[in-house]
Image: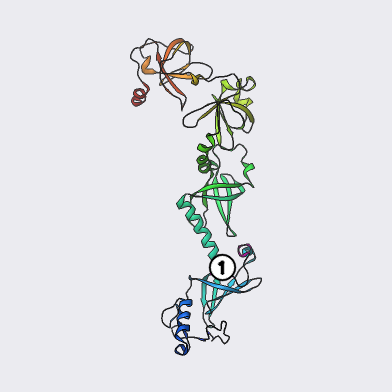
């Protein structure tokens, strides 16, 4: 390295030289006053007369002394210049940098003959950005991104940090609390999500999980849901017994087909379509947050009065299964009469029986019954253990 002829700071009247080991030294160091020399050592962070040699991969702080269209020149602690090239695509990463500003630089190459230090500000920014993604994954913290496009299996989400674009993948199954009826509507939206997994190689992408983030918001949202409230929601699922509606962005209500208006209940599979907007009334909210709804203002759920030991007279056997008979208690609710509880009796679809509730699960909406005159019924726990 050529000696610097120009003194940049009069407080440090010194020149430089490089020995045969490529270690920088002060020339005529002994002529400097002791107080000045101590200040130099403190400023440069060195011990004795040797400076730390600079190698590829080092991170060095310095002052920006020049900015042009393709390069930023950084002067670090009066030792040498670092030349930091950048491309047009990287300009937004450098937005806001000014001459005189201190900046961190990653040394990417040390050239000899002549001696030149090549650095990168943008590469260091990229490293810090990917470090942010890794920390978000490890600490289970939320990241923000914009949905850019769709693929057959999910979405491409762009996370921008420090001017760096990080492309991530979000599977369809992790995009929402329910299956999206119109997934294309998500394109262009800013979303929040957890980092589900990190990329395994340079060709891969980090995987985001928006569903887990949305589910974490539900407990707080449920605090504002009351029985009798009127809501509108989007149909997200249709099954034989009813429909699922997403409302308030992240909550899901179930409407049994008996709770739907006549125009829908006759044939829900053809008259109700995913994406339809339906108005409904909150009928019940279970202890663990399951929501049941109706379209009838005067309708009350059987679950408001259903109790263990409750009897039902002259109810119909609506189906036969390998594990028992399905008993229709009313339009809203059916019950299971296990095979062990009628193995000595002849029973067929369409028969009318008297039964009594022996167990129920309000969360799953499961009801178990036995014949009213059965004095020693098999309880569900025993039944399922045997199976």
Q: In x, y percent, where is residue 59? A: 49, 70
Q: In x, y percent, where is residue 230? A: 61, 28
Q: Quadrant of residue 23?
A: bottom left
Count of marks, rendered view: 1
In terms of secondary structure, where does tag 1 sit? Answer: helix
The residue indicated by pointer 1 is: 121
Q: Residue at x 55, y 49 (%)?
A: 169
Above/below status of 230 relative to 338: below
Q: In x, y percent, where is residue 284? A: 52, 26
Kindly give the residue lying farthest to the right in the view shown: 69
> Is residue 12 among the parts visible in the rendering?
yes
Where is the C terminus found, in terms of image quarters? top left
98 is within the stretch colored magenta: yes
Above/below status of 137 relative to 87: above
Above/below status of 367 relative to 276: above
Range of the magenta residues?
92-104
Which residue is more in the foreground, 90 or 300? Answer: 300
291 is within the stretch colored magenta: no
Above/below status of 236 relative to 72: above
> Is residue 23 among the parts visible in the rendering?
no
Mark 1 residue crowding within 10 angstroms, few (<14) / some (14–19) / many (20+): many
Q: In x, y percent, where is residue 128? A: 52, 61
Kindly give the residue lying farthest to the front in the view shown: 35
In the drawing, does residue 182 fall left or right of residue 26? Answer: right
């Amino acid at each position: 390295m050529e000696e610097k002829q120009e003194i940049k700071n009069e407080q440090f009247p010194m020149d430089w030289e490089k020995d045969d080991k490529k270690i920088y030294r002060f020339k005529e160091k002994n002529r400097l006053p002791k107080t000045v020399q101590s200040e130099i050592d403190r400023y440069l962070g060195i011990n004795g007369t040797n400076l730390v040699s600079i190698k590829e991969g080092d991170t060095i702080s310095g002052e920006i002394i020049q900015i042009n269209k393709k390069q930023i020149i950084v002067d670090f602690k009066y030792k040498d210049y670092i030349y930091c090239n950048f491309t047009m695509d990287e300009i937004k990463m450098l937005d806001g940098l000014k001459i005189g500003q201190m900046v961190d630089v990653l040394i990417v190459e040390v050239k000899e003959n002549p001696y030149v230090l090549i650095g990168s500000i943008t590469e260091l920014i990229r490293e810090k950005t990917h470090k942010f993604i890794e920390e978000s994954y490890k600490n289970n913290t939320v990241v923000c991104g914009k949905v850019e496009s769709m693929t057959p299996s999910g979405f491409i989400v762009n996370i921008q940090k420090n001017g760096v674009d990080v492309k991530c993948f979000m599977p369809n199954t992790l995009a929402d609390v329910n299956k999206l009826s119109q997934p294309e509507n998500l394109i262009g939206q800013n979303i929040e999500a957890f980092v589900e997994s990190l990329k395994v190689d340079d060709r891969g992408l980090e995987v985001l999980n928006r569903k887990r983030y949305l589910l974490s918001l539900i407990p707080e949202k449920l605090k504002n849901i009351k029985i009798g409230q009127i809501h509108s929601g989007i149909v997200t699922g249709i099954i034989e017994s009813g429909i699922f509606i997403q409302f308030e962005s992240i909550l899901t209500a179930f409407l049994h087909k008996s709770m739907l208006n006549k125009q829908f209940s006759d044939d829900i599979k053809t008259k109700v379509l995913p994406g339809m907007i339906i108005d409904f009334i909150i009928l019940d909210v279970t202890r663990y947050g399951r929501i049941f709804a109706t379209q009838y203002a005067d309708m009350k759920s059987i679950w408001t009065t259903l109790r263990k030991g409750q009897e039902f007279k002259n109810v119909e056997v609506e189906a036969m299964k390998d594990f028992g008979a399905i008993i229709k208690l009313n339009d809203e609710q059916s019950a299971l009469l296990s095979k062990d509880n009628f193995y000595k009796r002849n029973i067929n679809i369409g028969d009318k029986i008297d039964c009594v509730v022996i167990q129920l699960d309000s969360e799953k909406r499961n009801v178990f019954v036995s014949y009213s005159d059965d004095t020693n019924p098999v309880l569900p726990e025993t039944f399922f253990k045997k199976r």
